[in-house]
Image (tube, rainbow, N blue to C red):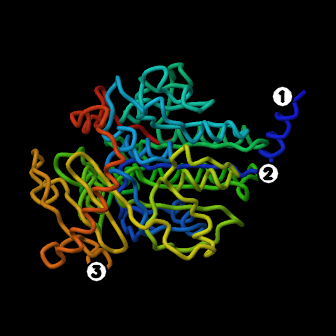
């Protein structure tokens, strides 16, 4: 009887909870969306999402690479706390000691599903259906052909037929939304667009014939596919009567790979300097949106926020309290968006990626970054000396103020050192940091859109 009473209490509480849709773009350039001023790639559906919710102009991720930022997003903890500093290889993955967002939501009565790119481990015990997701459609690695079915799974079973992956992921996400309309759900929609390989459909390529640079033209077609499918899922919400009770969160996993030495995709991070794989703004500042009709008023929010906050915001929206023993590091953004909390969400934000580091406090940023951002040789370069920038006046990080402000350098370095004492050594090496490029057998074939 006690079990039945507990079951019905959880079911009743869950009935009033919102759906949570967490969408990630992969390797998107900061400049490549209309709501950031992009002119050559229309993104009407993402722009509509931005207009319907809060656009965070200073939204960050906790690292400049794919897997570490996803690990932080799904655990609510800085990845350096548990050693997930670099991209894993086939033997490594998100440590089993960490609790994930879908695990927390499932305990509260949520249906949980994931569609798209995992990149947090491929051993059976590391896969999505063992880390809190009841349903999974996607691939386990860091990159995948947009046309080949090899490696695409439904649960643990190989998928034999599939269209263009971005369209397939939009279709599967929409089906999940419709299938679970009578129960609160959490859907993690992790597109592999616009990550390499540079695969696009003929129909979308034709839309961008005026772009003369081939890589940029293909990138534009891939961005257009991502945008189309964001719109497709939002349409499914509307048609199934779930739009008003769905919290939508959107980010890119890191900045665009614009620097030689990364697997470039034709993206742009303007007006930011730096690239994926660097702790400059271009590597860690990303498009960042939060929308919830009737609950979050449309606005532009200018204080720095980070993807850890999306974990905390999702839990708060679901009415889930997590004790201090969980050591979560994000904050619920809803009171800040509502104006109920006037202070900035964070006193400071911190980054560590091997020898690279950064701390941002207010408008000050202290940083050491990959030297390729300066030389762009594509070859191994030493990390820069420590630099100090005033981001309010110098968003491109051009004028180093370290010599003029030695006390500020000392202060920020001390704060970063104190923060770093709570981190652990990486559980695997930096030699895996670049293993998310085009996988073997990636298709070069272009197919017509349906």
Front residue (pair 49, 380) = 380
Q: Quadrant of residue 42?
A: bottom left
Left or right of 329 in this view: 175: right
Q: Are marks 3 and 1 in contact (CB under 8 Å)?
A: no
Whole-percent x, y for residue 69 in the image: 40, 46
The answer for how far apart the CA atoms under marks 3 and 1 are is 59 Å
Front residue (pair 430, 343) = 343
User: Counting other residues with Cα less than 10 Å from the Cα at mark 3, is it few (<14), some (14-19), or many (20 or more)?
Assistant: few
Point out the image quarter for the N terminus: top right
What is the number of the mark on residue 3?
A: 1
Left or right of 301 in this view: 258: left
Q: How many marks?
A: 3
Left or right of 55 in this view: 274: left
The answer for how far apart the CA atoms under marks 1 and 2 are is 21 Å
Closer to the chain start, of discs 1 and 2, is 1
Instruction: Assign a secondary structure to mark 3.
Output: loop
Instruction: Assign a secondary structure to mark 2.
Output: loop
- Residue 357 higher or lower than 402, as above or below: above
Q: Which residue is mark 2?
A: 16
Q: Are marks 1 and 2 in contact (CB under 8 Å)?
A: no
The answer for how far apart the CA atoms under marks 2 and 3 are is 45 Å
Front residue (pair 41, 29) = 29
Q: Which residue is mark 3?
A: 393
What is the number of the mark on residue 408?
A: none
Q: Are marks 2 and 3 in contact (CB under 8 Å)?
A: no
User: Counting other residues with Cα less than 10 Å from the Cα at mark 1, is it few (<14), some (14-19), or many (20 or more)?
Assistant: few
Q: Residue at x 56, y 65 (%)?
A: 48
Instruction: Assign a secondary structure to mark 1.
Output: helix
Q: Residue at x 81, y 39 (%)?
A: 11
Closer to the chain start, of discs 2 and 3, is 2
Whole-percent x, y for residue 86 in the image: 30, 39
């Amino acid at each position: 009887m006690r079990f039945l009473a507990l079951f019905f209490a959880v079911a009743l509480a869950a009935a009033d909870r919102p759906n949570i849709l967490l969408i990630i773009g992969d390797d998107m350039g900061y400049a490549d969306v209309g709501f950031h001023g992009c002119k050559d790639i229309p993104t009407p559906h993402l722009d509509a999402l931005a207009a319907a919710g809060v656009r965070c102009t200073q939204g960050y991720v906790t690292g400049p690479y794919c897997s570490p930022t996803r690990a932080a997003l799904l655990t609510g903890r800085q990845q350096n706390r548990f050693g997930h500093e670099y991209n894993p290889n086939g033997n490594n993955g998100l440590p089993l000691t960490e609790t994930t967002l879908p695990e927390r939501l499932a305990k509260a009565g949520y249906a949980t599903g994931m569609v798209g790119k995992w990149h947090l481990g491929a051993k059976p015990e590391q896969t999505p259906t063992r880390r809190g997701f009841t349903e999974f459609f996607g691939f386990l690695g860091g990159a995948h052909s947009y046309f080949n079915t090899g490696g695409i799974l439904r649960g643990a079973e190989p998928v034999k037929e599939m269209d263009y992956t971005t369209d397939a992921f939009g279709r599967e996400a929409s089906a999940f939304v419709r299938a679970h309309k009578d129960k609160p759900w959490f859907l993690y929609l992790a597109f592999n667009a616009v990550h390499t390989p540079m695969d696009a459909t003929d129909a979308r390529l034709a839309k961008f014939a005026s772009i003369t640079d081939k890589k940029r033209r293909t990138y534009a077609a891939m961005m257009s596919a991502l945008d189309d499918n964001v719109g497709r899922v939002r349409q499914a919400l509307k048609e199934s009567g779930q739009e008003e009770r769905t919290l939508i969160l959107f980010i890119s996993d890191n900045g665009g790979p614009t620097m030689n030495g990364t697997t470039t995709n034709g993206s742009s991070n303007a007006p930011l300097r730096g690239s994926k794989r660097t702790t400059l703004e271009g590597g860690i500042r990303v498009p960042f949106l939060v929308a919830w009709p009737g609950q979050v008023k449309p606005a532009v929010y200018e204080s720095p926020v980070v993807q850890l906050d999306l974990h905390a915001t999702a839990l708060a929206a679901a009415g889930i309290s997590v004790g201090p023993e969980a050591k979560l590091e994000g904050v619920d953004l809803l009171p800040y968006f509502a104006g109920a909390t006037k202070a900035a969400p964070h006193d400071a934000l911190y980054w560590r990626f091997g020898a690279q580091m950064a701390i941002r406090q207010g408008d000050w940023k202290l940083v050491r970054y990959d030297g390729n951002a300066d030389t762009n040789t594509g070859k191994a370069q030493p990390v820069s000396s420590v630099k100090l920038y005033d981001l309010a006046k110098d968003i491109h990080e051009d004028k180093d103020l370290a010599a003029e402000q030695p006390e500020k350098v000392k202060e920020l370095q001390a704060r970063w050192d104190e923060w770093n004492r709570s981190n652990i050594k990486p559980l695997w090496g930096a030699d895996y940091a670049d293993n998310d490029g085009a996988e073997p057998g990636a298709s070069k074939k272009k197919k017509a859109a349906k």
